[in-house]
Image (spheres, helix red, strand yellow):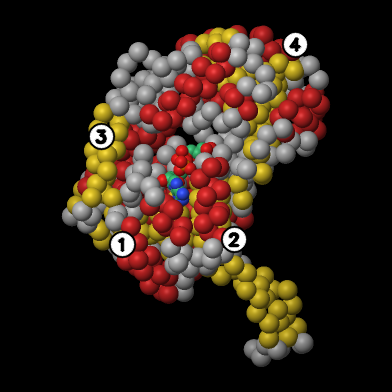
Amino acid sequence: MKYSGRTIADFALTVDGRDHPTSRTFDVINPATGQLLTTAPALDPSELDVVFGAAQQAFEQWKQDDAYRRQRLLEAADAIDAAAEDLVGILTAEQGKPLDKSQIEISSASMYLRYYADLDLPREVIKDDHEGYEEILHRPLGVVAAIAPWNFPITLAMWKIAPALRAGNTMVLKPSPYTPLSTLALGSVLRDILPPGVLNVISGPDPLGAQMVGHPVPRKVSFTGSTATGKKVAAAAADDLKRLTLELGGNDPAIVLDDIDIGKVAEQLFWSAFENTGQICLAVKRVYAHESVHAELVDALAEIAQSVKVDDGTVAGAQLGPINNAPQLDRVTSLVEDARQRGARIVAGGGSLDRPGYFFAPTIIDRVEDGVRIVDEEQFGPVLPVVAFRDELDAVRRANDSTYGLTASVWSGDPNRAARIGLELDTGQVSINSHGRGVRPHLPFGGRKWSGIGTENGIWGLRGFTEMQVITGPRRVS
Ligand code: NAD
């Protein structure tokens, strides 16, 4: 498909509305083969001044006209829909997920743009009478540095782009070096719609992300990624008190009560853990199942795990693709090995598939307890430990005994009972008889404890890209 006389797959940086040539490149691997997919342009860090300068200059005009911004966001959504076929193919090639899942991811990008284009951000009038007026305005911050991970490159970038631009900010966006291509292609598509400098898309190996955070121009850093990196971002941003949103890791518990019909929920529970090959911040990462239903649940999950079609995302019927990258495959492998050595029973899967690429068999782990790494740490892969419990309060205590606090779920034949237990969970969201149901454009999403700082989505996500300004004055003369 052609954009401004170039093809979407040229994978150039977008800076100030144009291609920004680079002298260096870096390799992008196809996770389904383990082989080189292509190379991507690497920004020379010394050029960050040019990139942030373009964003800063564009801010002066972009911040002025709310109606104009809303219109551009709607047009951006249409442009993404028009380019969806290309974007879907690129996303699957670099990330590994099946094509139908990439399609959902690209569609969600235009959905978020339309949602924020339609959302009002009214000034709040506190007082307006014969004595005078008091108003609160939500003003854009300026330039935002946005940094995204490799599991949902487009969705998670769009959680930043749509509200930040809608509020009147401009942006420099950097995807993960594992998945730069779809985001670079997105930059190419949107440069025809947005004024130059409003959305700049750069790529390159680390430490480019750290150098963005350390740059003096951005007034806010919006970061999605691991907790370890998030802490570094927070420390670096502290130097000049940049505003921060951190969406970090999770170790989401699902608590399955004794009154549940396992036959009815096993499939849903399975996919809540394994969708996107388990590489979702809010995937179910540990199950606490009441001892009366535990064995039945383990068997049901194992049966599903063994029936799932794991394949190259471009193959028709593939339900799960590979793990995205070699270090992550190594990490998942070592967590499973550790559990095995600690006496756990591997009921399904347990290792890599015997084929090229980073494929790992969907794995269900039984006879495992808190204190084993696969339960305590974030696996971020296609592996699920199922822990038995006797006492409900103890299950809640164990679920909360984590440095993470992203989301959680409680599963019961009595939704009211489950909701009462849900209130005890120390997480940003709790779902009853489902997991992650609260991930919608209009609902606040954010983690407690080490799962993050700040909120994305909804009006709260929009306000996160603003600062309040109070205006007071004498009685208005009309
Ligand atoms: P990561 O922290 O390794 O990398 C994330 C991004 O940060 C990449 O673009 C990387 O290049 C960049 N980066 C690396 N070092 C940096 C530094 N010092 N300063 C600034 N940027 C730096 O994370 P990942 O492996 O790409 O993603 C997986 C993690 O992301 C998991 O822990 C997952 O739970 C988390 N995640 C969280 C959410 C959420 O919304 N809470 C969503 C998706 C993923």
Residue at horizontal 80%, vertical 33%?
420
Residue identifier under label 3: 37
- The reply to whether discs 1 and 2 touch (Cβ–Cβ < 8 Å) is no
Where disc 4 sits, the SS reads helix
Q: Determine contact: label 2, label 3, CB under 8 Å.
A: no
Q: Residue at x 40, y 70 (%)?
A: 56
Q: Is residue 96 left or right of residue 381?
A: left
Percent x, y of residue 268: 58, 23
Determine if residue 165 is in view.
no
1 or 2: mark nearer the eye? 1
> Would you call the spot at circle 1 few (<14 residues within 10 Å), some (14-19), or many (20 or more)?
few
- Side (left or right) of 388 relative to 14: right
Residue position marked by numbered label 2 in the rendering: 463
| Label 1 residue SS | helix
Circle 4 is placed at which residue position? 292
Type of residue at label 4? Ser
Residue most toward the bottom? 477
- Give the label, 1 or 3, closer to the camera: 1
Marks 4 and 2, how far apart in space?
46 Å
- The 10 Å Cα crowd at callout 2, few under 14, some 14 to 19, many 20 or more, is many
Residue 290 x/y as whole percent: 74, 16
Residue under numbered circle 1:
47
**Residue 244 image offset from top left, x and y in percent:** 56, 57
| Image disc number at residue 375 | none
Q: Residues within 10 Å of mark 3 (few under 14, many from 20)?
A: some
CA separation, marks 2 and 3?
39 Å
Determine whether label 4 and label 3 are within 8 Å by CB.
Answer: no
